[in-house]
Image: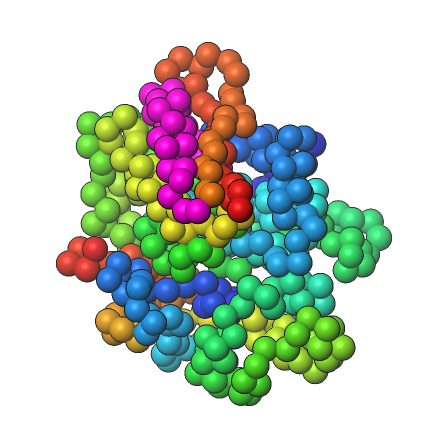
Amino acid sequence: MLPTPDTSHVPYQRVYEPAEDSFLLLDTLSSATETAYLARRFGSSIVAPLILEVGPGSGVVIAFLTANARTIFGTSDILTLGVDVNGFACAATEKTVSRAVVTENNSSSTKRQDEERETGTFLAAVQGDLTSPLRPGTIDMLVFNPPYVPTAELPAAAFAPSSSSTQTTTFRQDSHLLELSYAGGKDGMETTDRLIAALPIILSKRGCAYILLCAQNRPEEVKERVRRWSGGGVGEVWKAETVGTSGKQAGWEKLQIIRIWRETNV
Amino acid sequence: MKVLTLNFLTCAVKACKTTNNSFPLHPKDAELVHDEIEINRDLLVNVLPRIDWTALRTTSTELGFPTLPEQPPTAEDLQQDEKMLKELHALLLETQMMEGKLVCGHCGHEYAVREGIANFLLPSHLV
């Protein structure tokens, strides 16, 4: 089992604390089936894949992917990136990733050669709304643990402080930042729907996306909707499958992870 | 934020996405830091094909780095060109933009960079 990145430095009063959903992502992305899939897709490529996590929060997932790149992708030549609406989450993510990479590099008893390197290359955490800061067609793998809890209203995105480690926030502002990390509006899908709609634009031709959903999000309908995109481009087939599930009936919050990708049959 | 990141970022304003001037964003008042990182040749060779070279040349010049050749090196060239490998490594992976602004060449919007984090959230009238 791969180590879980240390997030003890993260200010949980304003950044989402790793929970069952985060750990389901770690388990799924490091499972035998998904590592085989990712290695097939990217492991022998001569073009380094660009991995984006949207809403990394503490950074635990993107740190895990970066620190264990070779085990998960079959290559350490990957680039990783995070975009979060919460500036404090961006700062937390940068720290979590760099600590996880240092820990991994120190843990290898003998100094690794280039070709045995385990860790990937983290580029930046950027503050922004979903994929809006990124160039179309650049992302080879996207991971999203969305605000999926159904709520009466979506929290306003109005309060969006620039990150500064010295900046102080009020209790109300902190609560608002945490709300942004879980409150999903109608069916818990208002933010996820926007992200899914952006996938055909932001993903590269070989791109895939892992999205976490809860039962209230109606995952079967979400997958059907994606499959209906097929035929948009010449010989283009969109696929969506469940690749990980929390398994147990944890009340209303039963979780699953779907993988979305396109296959071009030309 | 590593300089390589700038090759993947664009203006967050929807109307700018389809224009050529919105990429690359132009650094302004940039404060850079240099972090020494062990060179990884394979990574650089594998990153090369996904770089927009014209944009990188612009970024490199605007950040005060030596002017890059007009044409990108081929993978074979790069593997044998120790000087170019080191230059690209220093620019793309060792240099971080910590403070300053990134400016869209189309709408002129300035995105602040503070403590290494660029802020692409737009004021409500631009969303």
Q: Nearer the viewer, residue A170 or A126?
A: A126
Rendered residue at 70%/82% (across/down): B83
The outermost residue toward the left is B125
> Height in image: A211 above or below A215?
below
Which segment did they paint magenta? A209-234
Residue B126 horizontal side relative to residue B64, left or right: left
Q: Nearer the viewer, residue B38 or B16?
A: B16
Residue A218 horizontal side relative to residue A96, left or right: left
Rendered residue at 58%/54% (across/down): A49
Work out whether residue B70 can be spotted.
yes
Residue A69 horizontal side relative to residue A164, left or right: right
> Height in image: A3 above or below B36?
above
Does B89 lie within the magenta span? no
Rendered residue at 26%/58% (across/down): B14
Rendered residue at 39%/76% (across/down): B27
Q: Nearer the viewer, residue A27 or A93?
A: A27
Q: Which quadrant is the C terminus of chain B positioned in?
A: bottom left
Residue A61 placement (x, y as % from top left): 53, 41
Residue A144 placement (x, y as % from top left): 44, 40
Q: How many numbered discs?
A: 0
Q: Quadrant of residue B94?
A: bottom right
Work out whether residue A143 can be spotted.
no
Residue A237 placement (x, y as % from top left): 46, 38
- Its colouring scheme is rainbow
Residue B31 placement (x, y as % from top left): 44, 77
Q: Quadrant of residue B43?
A: bottom right
> Height in image: A113 above or below A176?
below
Q: Quadrant of residue A225?
A: top left
